[in-house]
Amino acid sequence: MIREIVRYGSKVLRRKALPVTSVDAEVNALIQDLFDTLAEADGVGLAAPQIGVSRRVIVVDISAAEATQPPMALVNPAIDAAEGTATAEEGCLSIPDLYGEVPRFTEVTISALDHEGCAFELSAEGFFARVLQHEIDHLDGRLFIDHMPPLRRQLLRGPLKRIRKEGEEWDRRHSSH
Ligand code: NI
């Protein structure tokens, strides 16, 4: 099911998401919703907090850029090792139409559970590593703009303020239940 993507300004994007204790049918439904919403938005990655669910689940699909890399769901992902840094432009579905240069590790080793609850390890580099780090950041309440130099971020103040209103509005609509 396609879900509404929560905008910057919502508290759910700043919360540390809770680990998944059991990869059950509910978590699989969440994974499906993440994939559906990601496809609709034509994005490369999406984290559960971005659809208002504060759980440690992400999906990534960079197959449009790297055809050999199949779409992937990661439950409770953790970065076990990392090396190298490179800076490149990033955006975020929760901060539409806003882009900025962000430094990231160039290579990461990540452990996670798959959609069946089986543990696996994954090595990634370049763009794939960047997307994974961006999505895992979401689980800790971090956004790509947090990695930008203060001066650069200052320049985005106007647009950020407009988007923040949408996020705060989402919180108001969801605070009653
Ligand atoms: Ni994002």
Image: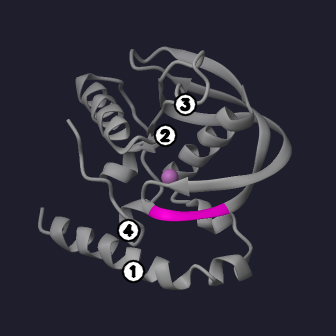
Please name which of the two marks, 2 or 4, marks the residue nearer to the observer.
Answer: 2
Q: Residue 133 sits in which quadrant?
A: top right
Q: Return the residue nearer the eye: 71 or 171.
A: 71
Q: Residue at x 37, y 39 (%)?
A: 38
Residue placed under numbered mark 1 in the picture:
162
Residue placed under numbered mark 4 in the picture:
11
Q: Are marks 2 and 3 in contact (CB under 8 Å)?
A: yes
Q: Classify residue 138 as left or right of residue 79.
A: left
Q: Residue 103, how many percent across, how many down?
A: 76, 55
Q: CA distance from mark 3 to mark 1?
A: 29 Å
Residue placed under numbered mark 2 in the picture:
45
For marks 2 and 4, the one nearer the N-term is: 4
Q: CA distance from mark 2 to mark 4?
A: 20 Å
Above or below 163: residue 123: above
Is the CB of mark 4 within 8 Å of ligand 1? no
Element marked by disc 3: loop
Neighbourhood count class around disc 4 (C-alpha, 10 Å): few under 14, some 14–19, many 20 upward: some
Please name which of the two marks, 4 or 1, marks the residue nearer to the observer.
Answer: 1
The N terminus, quarter of image: top left
Q: Residue 30, how many percent across, how many down?
A: 29, 34
Residue type marked 3: Ile
Q: Residue 116 sits in which quadrant?
A: top left
Neighbourhood count class around disc 1 (C-alpha, 10 Å): few under 14, some 14–19, many 20 upward: few
Q: Residue at x 24, y 46 (%)?
A: 3
